Amino acid sequence: MPTLIPQPTRIQSAGNKPKLIDEYIGRVNTQTSAASVAHMRSPGGWIEPGQRPEFDEFTIVLKGMLRVEHKDGFLDVTAGQAVIAHSGEWVRYSTPQQGGAEYIAVCLPAFSMETVHRDE
C-alpha cells in the first residue's frame, strides 16, 4: 500500500543566512535511508560551506538561480533547469542574486550529516 506523507519536517540549514529546508522523504521525516527529497528556499546572498558528499544530489530549480561551484568553476542553474552533483565531487551551493532561489533536492542515498563532509 502506498504511504502518505502528510507533511514535511523543517530541517536546520547550514550557511551564512537562514534557509528553509522542508524534508518530505529522508532520514528525519520518514526514516528513509535510500533517498531524500526536500523543498529548499534560500534567500539572496546565502552561501553554505563547500562539501564532498557520499551521495548524488539531483536538484531542480523552480524559481530564481542556484549557483553550484565545483573544482573547475561554477554553474548558474536557473528556473526550469536541473543539475546533478556527483558523489565524491567537491561542490558549494549559493544563491547570490536578490530574491534567492526555490528548488527541490533529491539525494541518493539520503542526505545525512555524517556523509555530507562539509568544509570546516
Image (cartoon, rainbow, N blue to C red):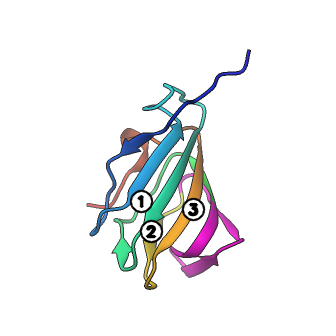
Q: Is residue 72 left or right of residue 95?
A: right
Q: Residue at x 54, y 60 (%)?
A: 89
Label 3: which residue?
103
CA separation in Å, label 2 and label 3: 15 Å
Q: Residue at x 31, y 64 (%)?
A: 15
Classify mark 2: helix, strand or loop.
Answer: strand
The amino acid on which the numbered mark 2 sits, given as a three-letter code, is Arg
- Residue extending furthest front? 6
Residue 36 numbered mark, or none: none
Q: Give percent across and percent down for residue 3.
A: 65, 22
Task: Report the span colored magenta.
Answer: 60-88
How many residues crowd mark 1 within 10 Å: few (<14), some (14–19), many (20+)?
A: some
Q: Is residue 108 left or right of residue 11?
A: right
111 in relation to 48, above or below: above
Q: Residue 8: say if magenta.
A: no
Label 1: which residue?
51
Q: Are marks 1 and 2 in contact (CB under 8 Å)?
A: yes
The amino acid on which the numbered mark 3 sits, given as a three-letter code, is Tyr
Q: Give percent across and percent down for residue 108.
A: 61, 42
The amino acid on which the numbered mark 1 sits, given as a three-letter code, is Gln
Q: Residue at x 48, y 64 (%)?
A: 90
Tell me which label, 2 or 3, sits earlier in the chain: 2
Considering depth in this image, is 5 or 50 the residue closer to the camera? 5
87 in relation to 3, above or below: below
Q: Residue at x 53, y 54 (%)?
A: 88
Q: Quadrant of the N terminus?
A: top right
CA separation in Å, label 1 and label 2: 6 Å
Determine the image quadrant of residue 14.
bottom left
Label 2: which residue?
92
116 in relation to 3, above or below: below
Residue mark closest to the camera, 3 vs 1: 3
